[in-house]
Amino acid sequence: MEYKYHLSESEMPRFFYNIVADMPNKPMPPLHPGTREPITPDLLEPLFPRDLILQEVSTERYIEIPEEVRKIYAQWRPTPLFRARNLEKLIDTPARIFYKYEGVSPAGSHKPNTAVAQAFYNKVSGVKGIATETGAGQWGTALAFGCQLFGLDCEVYMVRVSYDQKPYRKVMMNTFGAQVYPSPSDRTEFGRKMLKKDPGSSGSLGIAISEAIEKAAADPKTHYALGSVLNHVLLHQTIIGQESLLQMEKAGHMPDIVVAPFGGGSNFAGIAFPFLHLNFTKNQNIRCIAVEPTSCPKLTRGSFKYDFGDTAGMTPLLPMFTLGHDFMPSAIHAGGLRYHGAGVIVSQLLKDQLIEAVAQNQERCFSAGMDFIRSEGIIPAPEATHAIATVIDEAIQCREEGTPKNILFNLCGHGYFDMGAYADYMAGKLKDAPADEDAIRKSLKTLDALQPPAR
Ligand SMILES: *Cc1c(COP(=O)(O)O)cnc(C)c1O
């Protein structure tokens, strides 16, 4: 009766896996918003170090993880993979449920996998500091941790609603040496513009991204970093799935279904891409399911269109599933999933029906989270409860069909800074807030003017 599948440090993967090498349809190019022509990598140089730009456009299947980065990973990696035997019992399912636990990292989520790599490449490039945004606070914490290790300054724009809901996240970033500001802030032109429009704005990831980019673009010694969406970020997270693959082999049960919550796509990509590699090269048929909140349903109700990655329109135009860069999701507790778009690679995979997407309501997610807490004893991040809700749906279906499938999900972070959210849930105060059809239609309409002319 094994509960835990362990890897030794020497079994830790030495390469990141770049799925672009294996994709049947390669991602479409990002476009310059002015000319609507594909951007050239040099346009990104004020914001990112060269190594990361090269990774962003790479088509090499494997990219070596630098020794310095591997040494830091070894502090908490390889992460454990558990079999959720008590959850299986609770829902009386013949399915075998496994979870990869990324909450053991110093920041409490999967985010340090890319934060440490990004801080390393920025340090090598010679900049003094990095500006970034954070939603739930996980990314800001991870980057603050990474910057501290490499002696870089870290300036974080934190979405207002999370800043107010999770004061200790901010303090945690401060202990790692970062400066944290609520966004919209009065420190940038765009932030001031947003505050003028709505002084009580709860903020959004899109707005916070615009503020961080504005800061970085104005200072040649400061770069910008993103915690999700971009190709190089997804790339760094593939260490999760590569470890999981080895652990599932040890368990003797390869997954039929892989599930992960979806904000911009990095933890989903991290766990799913190494299994999609088996679908592409070994004729496997592993279902990979991304789970988003009904309040921010870009994968299930958005459109595949060119759109900006931020609200102000400072990024290149990216081909992705989006609700439109003006879309304002309601203030749900899974702050990390309140992003209007999806990474370019995952968007192409969904368009080609190589992955699946479902949306879950907030109440249902917390109820699934409580089932998990009471059976497995780990308090999941509100984002991760989205995966758990879908895992339970699939496991119930296994019970009804009498099929013992193997289900693996990414427990991408712990929820120990989210007690306010659990308190609200237990007090019956959480409301479902599915996105309004008119709001989506209106927001998507603004994208018509951004589409490139047909060629
Ligand atoms: C940031 C975050 C997410 C959402 O971002 P992805 O890039 O989609 O992974 C989900 N869960 C946790 C715990 C996070 O910190």
Image (cartoon, grey):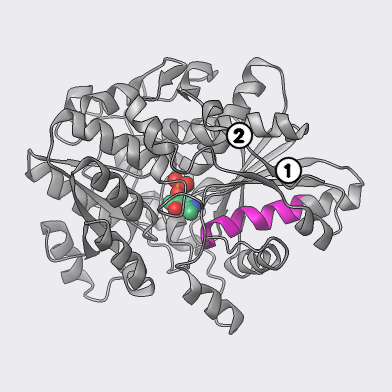
Q: Quadrant of residue 380?
A: bottom right
Q: CA distance from mark 2 to mark 1?
A: 20 Å
User: What residue appears at the point 25 percent right and 29 percent down from the top-left corner?
Assistant: 36
Q: Amino acid at mark 1?
A: Ile
Residue nearest the viewer, comparing 132 with 446:
132
Tell me the SS state at disc 2: loop
The correct choice, above or below, for 100 with respect to 158 in the image is above
Q: Quadrant of residue 68?
A: top left
User: What residue appears at the point 50 percent right and 32 percent down from the top-left corner?
Assistant: 239
Residue 221 lies, in percent from the top left, at 8, 39
Residue 407's tag is 1
Q: Count the marks.
A: 2
Query: Left of 306 or right of it: where is 415?
Result: right
User: What residue appears at the point 39 percent right and 56 percent down from the top-left corner?
Assistant: 138
Residue nearest the viewer, comparing 324 with 398:
398
- Secondary structure character of the magenta stretch overall: helix
Residue stretch rendered in magenta on the structure: 382-394
Would residue 17 be seen by someone viewing this image from the given angle?
no
Residue nearest the viewer, comparing 397 with 244:
244
Residue 342 lies, in percent from the top left, at 44, 43
Residue 44 in magenta?
Answer: no
Q: Which residue is mark 2?
A: 7
In which quadrant is the C terminus drawn? top left
Q: Amino acid at mark 2?
A: Leu
The extreme right residue here reads 402
Residues packed near mark 1 inside 10 Å, few (<14), some (14 to 19) or many (20 plus): many
Tell me the SS state at disc 1: strand
Q: In terms of sequence position, does the residue under pointer 2 or pointer 1 come before the other? A: 2
